[in-house]
Amino acid sequence: MSNVDEVMAGYAGLQADQEACYKDLHQHPELSHQERRTAGRVAARLQEYGFTVHSGIGGTGVAGVLANGSGPVVLLRADMDALPVREDTGAQYASTVTARDGDGREVPVAHACGHDVHVSCLLGAGQLLAGHRGQWNGTVVTLFQPAEEAGDGARGMVDDGLLRRIPALDVALAQHVLPGIAGTVGTRPGPFLTEADSMKITVYGRGGHGSMPQNTVDPVVLAALITIRLQTVVSREVAPGETAVLTVGSSQAGTKSNIIPDRAVLLLNLRSYSQQTRQRMIDAVQRIVRAECQASGSPRDPDFETFDSFPLTDNDPDTTSRVAAAFRAHFGDRAGRAGQQTASEDFSDVPRAAGIPYTYWAIGGTDPDAYRDAEQAGRVQDDIPANHSPKFLPVLQPTLRTGTEALVAAALAWLAP
Ligand code: ZN
Ligand code: ZN
């Protein structure tokens, strides 16, 4: 038996507990920066498994350290936060939770991105590694980070001294459950997830009576023209073949039909795989917005504010091929290559701050028959709910087992003697 098989032999003994833990987390989702209950459960379990636990890093972040002789120091990471989504999966253990968001609004909360899978799998892997110390040498650091969805959870832990509290790291590893056949894993060297920025743009008009437009500068018309013109950034200014997305997700102005307001606010989301494309898009947005404001006779320069910025997830080729080889050895033809995703992640803020290589892989979470049927019909995008959908719900198994195995197999690629 391989070291991975020896460690995974313990899985049958913890499967029921892991599934119960997952359902508990699923029924108690918490918004970004509010992951107090989740962090408490995580810390208690890590302590029970014999980890040295550091809690409250960057708010609710938890790091567990398990030293087992000399050898590499491997960081395994899971994110803990849920989303303001009303779950509509019909699951027996569906969330009915509501909470107050950062703006004080009461919102429904659900684990619509599957971070409860990540937490359960990392706890399972931690328990297995702690229980089979004869199979490996080195140090495992399990990192449970807050606020991935806000893009600032990883940076918050780094800023709060994470790297001073844990041993010097050699490599960082993380995973995400995505639509795909449950039981499969996918790796990809190089750029895997886009960098992303959100931008708030305020443009100014001159308000007045709706019956006298000649005395006003109408920001509603201005915002509409900007929204249309921004559609040319990706189609006309970014090279064909280069991936980029620009979405105007919100456009707001005015209160009443017969009042011309004095300002409009646009919220944009921009994504790309290169710093060059990112800068090109930001420059184009600012140029177009300023020029449209000028064309409309806007009385004041527009304001630009960037928020929710995510770094590029750019998998180190050597680290990725080491993990891919470990996956092929363990999973056989269930290990493959992942496609590029236009989603984003802040995980890489930790390895980047530590100056170490990293890789991030995908695990499938969809019922295999449902996925194959949808694939055959060419209807994956229509029929298979993706992350953030109210209907997104990974099948319990083999998703949890596979996510646990993937973490163990990847960690042992550095730690097995
Ligand atoms: Zn998400
Ligand atoms: Zn996610």
Image (tube, grey):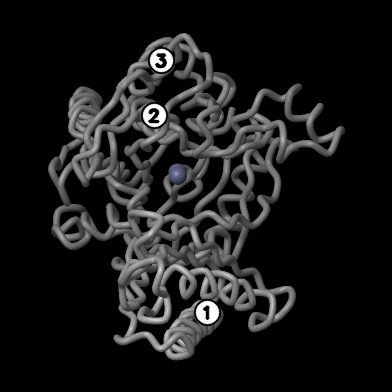
Which residue is most to the right? 376
Task: Residue under label 3, please give it.
Answer: 14
Q: Position of residue 217 (x, y in %)?
A: 39, 79
Q: Is residue 50 left or right of residue 350?
A: left
Q: Secondary structure at mark 3?
A: helix
Mark 1–mark 3 CB contact (< 8 Å): no
Residue in the picture at 39% in, 17% down: 23
Between discs 2 and 3, the one toward the N terminus: 3
Residue 68 image offset from top left, x and y in percent: 28, 40
Q: Quadrant of residue 267?
A: bottom left
- Label 2 vs label 3, nearer the camera: 2
389 over 199 or under it: above or below: above
What type is the residue that disc 3 sits on? Leu
Per the image, label 1 sits on a secondary structure element best described as: helix
Residue 404 placed where, x, y %?
Answer: 48, 31
- For the residues marked 1 and 3, what is the alpha-carbon distance in whole angstroms? 49 Å
Residue hosting label 2: 110
Report which residue position mark 1 lands on.
Answer: 281
**Location of residue 276 in the rendering, given as x and y in whole percent from the top left corner:** 53, 83
Disc nearer the start of the sequence (1/2): 2
Q: Front-most of 194 and 254? A: 254
Q: Looking at the picture, which amino acid does disc 1 mark?
A: Met
The quadrant of the image that shows the N terminus is top right
Residue 314 appears in the picture as rendered: yes
Tell me which numbered mark, 1 or 3, is placed earlier along the sequence. Answer: 3
